[in-house]
Image: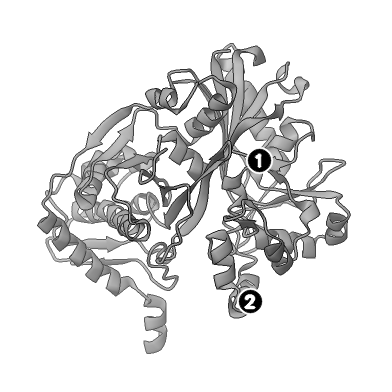
Amino acid sequence: MSFILALDQGTTSSRAILFDHDGAVHASAQKEFPQHFPQAGWVEHDPLEIWASQLEVARTALAGAGLRAADVAAIGITNQRETTVIWDRRSGEPIHNAIVWQDRRTASFCDELKRAGHGDLITSKTGLVIDAYFSGSKIRWLLDHVPGARERARRGELAFGTIDTWLLWKLTGGALHLTDPSNASRTLLFNLHTGAWDDELLRLLDVPRELLPEVRSSCEVYGETAPELFGAPVPIAGIAGDQQAALFGQNCFSRGLAKNTYGTGCFMLMNTGTQPVASRHQLLTTVAWKMGTQTDYALEGSVFIGGAVVQWLRDGLGLIKSSGDVEALAASVPDCGGVYLVPAFAGLGAPHWDQYARGTITGLTRGTTSGHIARAALEGIAFQVADVLEVMRKDSGIPVHELRVDGGASANNLLMQFQADLLQVPVVRPKVAETTAFGAACLAGLAVGFWKDRVEVAKAWQPDRTFEPAKTADEVAHRRSRWAEALNRARDWEHRTASVGRV
């Protein structure tokens, strides 16, 4: 049995990747599935479309590599987090489309919880802030809006799951209703300190306990796939939410190791060890993973607009024809020419949390070129990441000696070098870019002995390039002070314009 099969179920596509013992990608397949937008601010997926796409790519990857189920030591699952599914335990049919993590339909209910003064209670128990992003309010909405759902849930006829739980149920033919702590900790219902569903939170959000999956570790053999799916049973042995899986895939096993994923937005996680660290700067405290009896925790900070600013340069301004062209355009000038671009197109995320901020470009002169704007856009990504890492250091009290990076924009050498300069620590990009899927593979492989321990897993992780800081601390301090001034001009823009009247 020479391979581990990772199922990477994302927001817009499902992927399956086969990894060998050296951590190399042996085969992969990917398929997009439809997004459903029934109303403004609502985002849904059809759970059966998710399942069909995930099964198809798993079979395609195996067939493309000429492999059978007997060649696979185990399956690991990683998934879009917070997306909520409820289904009938007997038929396996969803009672409604899945409500996606991006969905905002429960925002008013979350506002009610805040006004009622429940914010401190929820944050102290869950490490999260009250927001429609998380699963708990989505569960409540489904129970309140699908006829008969709440009564059926109390009778034990329905099952809730995030996408990992839904896939595990389908893979095992309905035999297993399980999740892991990395996903459970994103629901607003899981107590970080007890490691269990919390009765007080269940009452507050009016969610019946009968609906919930059992919480098991992130690394163990849960069961086997139904034989008819792949021709023979395959062990399922690892589960982690996508960002936590990437942290594991980046070998951030020790306290103080951190990774940043450069996607549409940016997600930074720092391993804070075996005790949850409360944030004073509105970062999230979350479970990283649980292995055996030990739970590791992480601080998490999210930037709303990362690689999306490059898409805007392409689609909104027409400065580049493809996203890959941005590095050459930005490198056509020696520096930003005093231009700063704050990409607050959807407000500002961590650590600023300003939903009324808007994007700004400052420092324009007649000498400003498209190259300066492109460079300022890339630098704006790096400045935001630096802001998050700064408060992570303050919250955790842990020095950060390097930042491990992944995601599409991590291929941009100019961006990665500037990131290293700002952080004043090395930025390390791995050879295997599929760190999320690799993390799920590692968790599964460790559970079945494919890799004997984390030391052996670490040998499968290899750096591609390390970007060393090349600017002085004084230069960085000057640039970051100018960035702070640009941020101040973007802050609270919607309220400022409202106070003087709109044109």
The mark tally for this picture is 2
Residue 334 pos. (x, y %): 11, 49
Residue furthest toward the front?
293
Residue 318 pos. (x, y %): 33, 52
In the displayed structure, would residue 132 be above or below residue 214?
A: below
- Which residue has dot 1 on it? 216
Viewed as shown, does residue 369 lie left or right of 250?
A: left
**Image quadrant for the C terminus?**
bottom left
Q: Residue at x 54, y 13 (%)?
A: 2
Query: Could you tell me which secondary element the residue under label 2 belongs to?
Result: helix
Amino acid on which disc 1 is placed: Arg
**Residue 405 occupies quadrant:** top left
**Image quadrant for the N terminus?**
top right
In the displayed structure, would residue 379 be above or below residue 69?
A: below
Residue furthest toward the bottom?
500
Residue 147 showing in the rendered view: no
Residue 184 pos. (x, y %): 62, 50
- Which residue has dot 2 on it? 112
In the displayed structure, would residue 219 be above or below residue 393?
A: above
Q: Of tags 2 and 1, which is closer to the observer?
A: 1
Kindly check if marks 2 and 1 are in contact, taking CB atoms under 8 A apart as contact. Answer: no
Label 2 neighbour load within 10 Å: few <14, some 14-19, many 20+: few
Amino acid on which disc 2 is placed: Glu
Residue 56 pos. (x, y %): 65, 28
